[in-house]
Image (cartoon, rainbow, N blue to C red):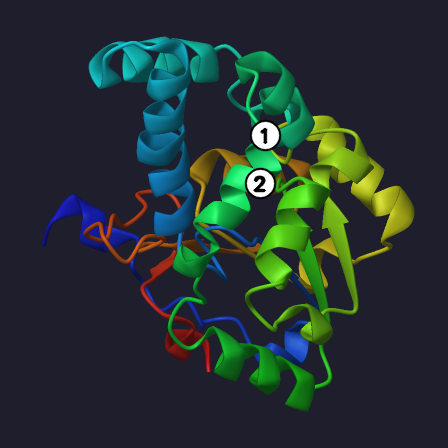
């Protein structure tokens, strides 16, 4: 058995009777991450190259370096920050390719399943509020959440320890009765360090990329595995 398969133990080994609160990430968890990957890795470089009259390869190199400087911080997902940094209208560019925004398989069914079980469902995302506006114009899932919390509003990125302390001040949740699902291992590790017990990793956040199973957290391909 390969090492990557070892952590793909039964992710639903917990009992739903033990869970009263479900925290869900957005991009790569509920929505297909292909949209975001294409936007930052292809579409923005194309527009940036044209605006600055440089080659696409040079634009990608410049932007990759610029992205790396603020990775895992609030600025990384702040559309206003990137509009100023790149001198581009990032919210409008996101709308320009909004047709690529899509819900991942079995997401709607899973949200309905949680409602039937009378679980409290919260969106917990690094996505900027302006990003949420763009995406919820295209997909009809906002109605399923008891409330939504973005890192911008909380004041820290989910990778940062202070995010969880600040979230707890606004959203009282019991650590051993809360399920958290995310596609980013750094975020899951931050949640584990805070004391959350039930953590699930999304192994296939993008429909265009092969799955990558976690070595540290139970991984699922689809929410069907939790129903």
- Counting from the top left corner in percent of width and height, residue 107 is at 48, 73
Residue 165 visible? The answer is no
Write down the residue under mark 2. Answer: 92
Query: From the viewer's perspective, is residue 197 above or below residue 113?
Result: above
Question: Residue 109: which disc?
Answer: none
Q: Quadrant of residue 55?
A: top left
In the picture, measured across the screen, residue 169 lies left or right of residue 159, that is right
Could you tell me which residue is drawn at 62 percent across and 80 percent down? 114
Report the quarter where the N terminus lies. bottom left
Of 158 and 18, which appears nearest the observer? Answer: 158
- Counting from the top left corner in percent of width and height, residue 188 is at 52, 42
Query: From the viewer's perspective, is residue 137 above or below residue 153?
Result: below
Residue 204 visible? The answer is yes
Q: Is mark 2 on a helix, strand or loop?
A: helix
Question: Residue 89: which disc?
Answer: 1
Q: How far apart are marks 2 and 1 (CA)?
A: 6 Å
Could you tell me which residue is drawn at 40 percent across and 32 percent down? 40
Query: From the viewer's perspective, is residue 24 above or below residue 97?
Result: below
Could you tell me which residue is drawn at 57 percent across and 85 percent down? 113
- The reply to whether dot 2 and dot 1 touch (C-beta < 8 Å) is yes
């Amino acid at each position: 058995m390969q090492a990557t398969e070892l952590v793909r133990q039964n992710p639903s080994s917990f009992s739903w009777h033990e869970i009263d609160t479900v925290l869900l990430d957005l991009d790569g968890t509920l929505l297909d991450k292909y949209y975001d990957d294409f936007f930052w890795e292809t579409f923005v470089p194309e527009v940036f190259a044209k605006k600055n009259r440089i080659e696409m390869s040079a634009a990608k190199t410049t932007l990759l370096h610029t992205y790396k400087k603020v990775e895992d911080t609030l600025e990384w997902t702040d559309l206003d920050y990137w509009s100023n940094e790149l001198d581009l209208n990032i919210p409008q560019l996101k709308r320009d390719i909004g047709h690529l925004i899509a819900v991942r398989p079995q997401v709607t069914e899973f949200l309905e399943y949680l409602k039937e079980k009378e679980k409290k469902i919260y969106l917990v995302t690094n996505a900027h509020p302006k990003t949420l506006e763009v995406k919820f114009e295209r997909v009809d899932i906002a109605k399923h959440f008891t409330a939504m919390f973005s890192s911008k509003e909380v004041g820290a990125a989910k990778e940062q320890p202070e995010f969880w302390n600040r979230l707890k001040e606004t959203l009282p949740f019991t650590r051993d009765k809360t399920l958290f699902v995310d596609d980013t291992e750094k975020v899951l590790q931050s949640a584990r360090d805070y004391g959350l017990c039930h953590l699930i990793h999304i192994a296939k956040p993008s429909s265009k990329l092969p799955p990558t199973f976690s070595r540290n957290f139970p991984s699922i391909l689809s929410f069907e595995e939790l129903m």
